[in-house]
Amino acid sequence: MLSLMMSGFVTGIAFSQVAQEQKEMKQDHKEWEQKVKTELNLTPEQATKYDAVCKEYEGKFEDLKKDASVSKEAQKEKKMELKKEKQAKLFEFFTPEQQTKYTELMEKKKAEKPKGY
């Protein structure tokens, strides 16, 4: 009985940690989106379009992550394709200056990301 209670306790802690990490990732994502809007000095119209594209692709990334039939390697390739598609959609309404700045921000973010992430 005691071991059953302990395993339940450990499982509860694990789920709590995962939930906290997901919450932090969502917060980081929101901060990133706000940084992009600010750094690129998006107009209200551009910001609305940016939010719509981000929401669309957030759903696509989530669907891909949940698809157990796709291998990790195939997921990685599809994720790269989705990132390129998303950028192409964003560049449809970004000015050339904003496109350059966005590319710089993405490169900086990529360089700061921990290895194996």
Image (cartoon, rainbow, N blue to C red):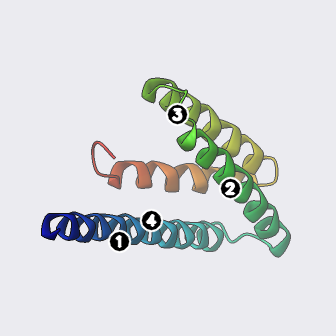
Determine which quarter of the picture holds residue 1: bottom left
Q: Secondary structure at mark 1?
A: helix
Mark 3, other Cα within 10 Å: few <14 / some 14–19 / many ≥20: few
Task: Provide the residue designation for mark 4.
Answer: 22
Quadrant of the image occupied by residue 67: top right
Label 4: state its secondary structure.
helix
Which amino acid type is shown beneath numbered disc 1? Ser
User: In terms of depth relative to the viewer, which is nearer, 74 or 6?
Assistant: 6
Q: Decide which of 1, 91 is in the foreground and name it.
A: 1
Q: Residues within 10 Å of mark 4 (few under 14, many from 20)?
A: few
Residue 20 placement, left or right of 83? left
Name the residue carrying label 3. Answer: 68
Looking at the image, residue 37 lies above or below residue 49: below
* Sequence order check, earlier mark of 3 and 4: 4
The tag earlier along the polypeptide, 4 or 2, is 4
**Percent position (x, y) of residue 95?**
76, 55
| Near-viewer residue (10 or 17) | 10
Residue topped by disc 2: 97
